[in-house]
Image: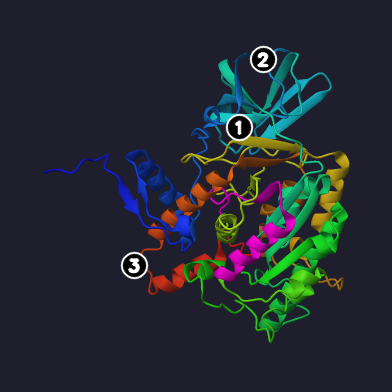
Amino acid sequence: MRKRVDRELALPSSSTLGGLGRRRALSRAEWFRMAGLVLLLGGVAMGQRPRLDPQGDYAYDLPSTEAAVRDVSLDDAGFAWSAEMPEGDTVFLEFRLAETTGEEPAVTAARGSASVRQVFEPKAAGRRFLDVSPLRAGDRVSLSGSGAKWQGGPARLFVYRNRPVAGRRVLVLAPHPDDAEIAAFGVYRQSNADIVTITAGDSGWQNFKALFPEEKEHYRIKGLLRAWDSITVPMIGGVPPERARNLGYYNGRMAEMQKSPAQVFPPFRTVLEDPAYYRKLNVDLSLRGRPFEGTWDALVGDIAWELGRVKPEVIVTPHPILDSHLEHQLTTVALAEALARWKGDCEIYLYTNHAILDEARPRGDRDAMTGLPAWQGADLRFSRVHSVPNTEEDRKLKLVALEAMHDLRAFDLRDGADPLDESKKRALFRNDYYRRAPRPVELFLVATREQVAALREDWLQTVQIARRPRSPAGSKNPAANHQQAERRGAGNQPDR
């Protein structure tokens, strides 16, 4: 007798945490959702970035979120934004790009003296979302395109109401030094924030090789400099060193730690006489005196400890599906497990520093809007979108903070020699955070604790499938290749 196609399929969870450790049954719809995520995250886990179909629709299910939805009608010149529209701080126009040309096709929306411009990927067409949050209802909004034409007719506005971050207790989680600045400098400058960085950033390219040619010594010093950056640079945004802390874990080890939660892992690229070497750089005496152990279990415990100390109303952390970097994903997986131990009331702001389908995002110059990351997969499990505005001073100071981070710029001896070879120049140009980060807004998907727990389950199940033994053609050592891919994260960027 043939089995029913829609029977429930059970995949085991690797969690050892009480309620998070039970088996979860998948319906047919959930199974297809998981299959799509496996194609995306599975490729990342094996070191292969999935491809964006530039003429495919963005798959955000905004109608199912906490948005007020209003129909509008687009013509060649724009649309009417009625004064009767509900008020909100974040507004997205859902529309269809009909045709684009050039490398930076853009749409500009203007009302009175206010305007916004958003740049889309080359050859883009299909369903897209334009962030018009800085504009306000009550009049007609004009649209103009630069290498972009839109489809006239029915369109929709999605309006969100979020509490301002100003004055709220915020905990920013950064996988590596500089992630907090890239994603949330404006948020932590505007709020009552603590910043906790997971790793010292003791990996990546050898940008100080001219001074420290021996590899292990180079990465020890690099970790020292970057850990200290994560503690001191936030002062530019008003966060004192005792509230900017680095847990001192080792860059490149988080994937192995998660697979073997109780096993102690040493640094990936250096040798330390004291495993707590980076943790002891902290100004905060409580963290400096807290025992260090390079295990996943200890990491989850440290995050739970920080949650109890800070008691945040808002937690800022990477999106574990949209962000392609493995250690970014794992930061939020660890947070989800820590939240099972800490029962405080909070909401989670999910950021994307490495968009899984478009590493160059946000596109365009730094005056362009950030925009939603390209996404063509399953539901991303969020309740709202918050487009947090940055003032001109926020943006200028953010740029200064980015420049202060050692790993975002080349180390120049000022001896007339070029500090970068051509491959490093191309990498810095492609990933130029001076262009990508100081935007008019910082964009977050806002999720509940329950949604983050579900995202963790999605991640565990997709990566569990991706980790099953395989023998790809031409691979003499698949296990070694997979381990290297896990350490690398994605996009050959293990430390940002």
Q: Nearer the viewer, residue 269 or 450?
A: 450
Say if 440 sits above or below 463 in the image: above
Asked if one can make out residue 18 in the rendered structure from this viewpoint, the answer is yes
Which residue is under mark 2? 79
Q: Nearer the viewer, mark 1 or mark 2?
A: 2
Label 1 residue SS: loop
Residue 471 marker: 3
Tell me the residue at 80%/46% (across/down).
191
Q: Residues within 10 Å of mark 1 (few under 14, many from 20)?
A: some
Q: Residues within 10 Å of mark 3 (few under 14, many from 20)?
A: few
Residue 479, position as x, y percentages in the image: 41, 72
Asked if one can make out residue 425 in the rendered structure from this viewpoint, the answer is no
Q: Is residue 61 magenta?
A: no
Q: In this rendering, would 346 be left or right of 235?
A: left
| Residue 325 location, quadrant | bottom right
Q: Is residue 311 magenta?
A: yes
Residue type beneath disc 1? Thr
Q: CA distance from mark 2 to mark 3?
A: 55 Å
Image: magenta residue range: 296-324
Q: Which quadrant of the rendered structure holds the C terminus? A: bottom right
Q: Are marks 1 and 2 in contact (CB under 8 Å)?
A: no
Label 3 residue SS: loop
Say which label, 1 or 3, has the lower sequence index: 1
Q: Nearer the viewer, residue 111 or 280?
A: 280
Residue 171, position as x, y percentages in the image: 72, 53
Q: CA distance from mark 1 to mark 2?
A: 23 Å
Residue 482, position as x, y percentages in the image: 45, 68
Number of numbered callouts drawn: 3
Which residue ends up furthest to the bottom in the rendered image? 273
Which residue is under mark 1? 101
Say which label, 1 or 2, has the lower sequence index: 2
Residue 134, position as x, y percentages in the image: 76, 28
